[in-house]
Image (cartoon, rainbow, N blue to C red):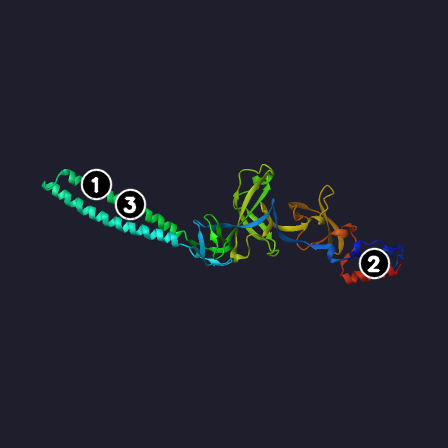
Amino acid sequence: MTRPTFGPTLALVGALLLAPACRRDTAPDTTDQALLVGPENLIVAAQETLQVGPALSGTLEAERSATVRAELGGTLVAVAVEPGQPVARGALLGRIDATGVRDVYESARTAVATAELNVELAQRNADRARALAAAGAIAARDREQAEWNLSTAETQLADARARAVSAQKQLAKTTLVAPFAGVVSERQAHLGDVVQAGNPLFTVVDPSLLKLEGSVPAEALGQLRLGTPVIFTVAGAGSTPLRGRLSRINPVADPATRQIRVTVAIANTGSRLAAGLFADGRVATAERHSVVLPADAVDRAGLRPMVVLVRGGQVARSEVELGLIDEGSERMEILQGVIPGDTVLVGSARGLPVGAAVRIGSPAERAVSATTSTGKE
């Protein structure tokens, strides 16, 4: 008959089960009586940082992003950047054919120069008419006519200057520049394309600051504060936890999901992250550094939670006091009952009887022990 074992990681040495049949005057061999426990069935308690709070997930986006659009129609005669290229504020992105617009601008400038000459002439005539009128050499109506001519010339000059400013602005619209320092993420047009006003041509983003927008349950609203840390990981950026902070909390819940929209600001130091990546984490409404155990190491079936330990080479049970519980990662804070360095049994090893002698064995030792036990049958 095969003796019972505790899963694939535990083997009972034959001498432990045969001890009652041995002679009373024979001293028991404690080494043979010890149960072998594999590393996969134990945890060494240690202090860790545990955060709890509502889960949050979403896609990273650039906090600052701008699409440069054509403000007038024409042929794209120059393209100065490619996607992924960094640009400074005001850097040239492209240029639209300005032949017709430039002609209008030059004509407006000429009109301004002509109007300025007319004003100078009208001013001299008006001054002369005033002097003559004061001496009684001309009639008052001649002086009034000269002053009216001056007023008309000044009005025409103002109109010419306004037209010139408008033409200059139109000419400036043919040159496409970066609105801020960043990186070109998209180029929607190519050299030679005929574009219309409103067509998107280039997209520039600032990669130094990203944002994560997501939703949390309305029940968590009372725990949310601007600046609350958010711990998350990003697909494709390794498993190292990253940090951001709540920057905006929508005061209105989504009527369909009854959840609250929040925005997380993320400093993208060294451009480690990229917009468009999926992020998964939680708003750390509470955070503590203490002894942390996985949930399956704690027995919560009784009146008080308990853990199974190895102390002095023997199985022992210890009541524990729980603190924070992270349901997402299934980890628990242990306030009392376990200290750093304690060996906690998990899995099938939790069924060992209190007081049983145990020792930690390697996979090879457990295989030999199991073979030996079988051979003694």
Q: CA distance from mark 1 to mark 2?
A: 122 Å
Indicate the secondary structure of the residue bearing disc 2: loop
Disc 2 target residue: 13
Camera-side residue: 52 or 203? 203
Q: Nearer the viewer, mark 1 or mark 3?
A: 1
Amino acid on which the number 2 mark rests in the picture:
Val
Provide residue 46's location: percent of width, then percent of height: 65, 54
The residue at 27%/46% (across/down) is 157
Disc 3 target residue: 158
Tell me if residue 179 can be seen: no
Amino acid on which the number 1 mark rests in the picture:
Trp
In the picture shown, does residue 353 fall above or below 250? below
Q: Nearer the viewer, mark 3 or mark 2?
A: 3
Amino acid on which the number 3 mark rests in the picture:
Ala
Disc 1 target residue: 148
The residue at 15%/43% (across/down) is 129
Tell me if residue 256 can be seen: yes
Provide residue 257's location: percent of width, then percent of height: 61, 39
Q: CA distance from mark 3 to mark 2?
A: 107 Å
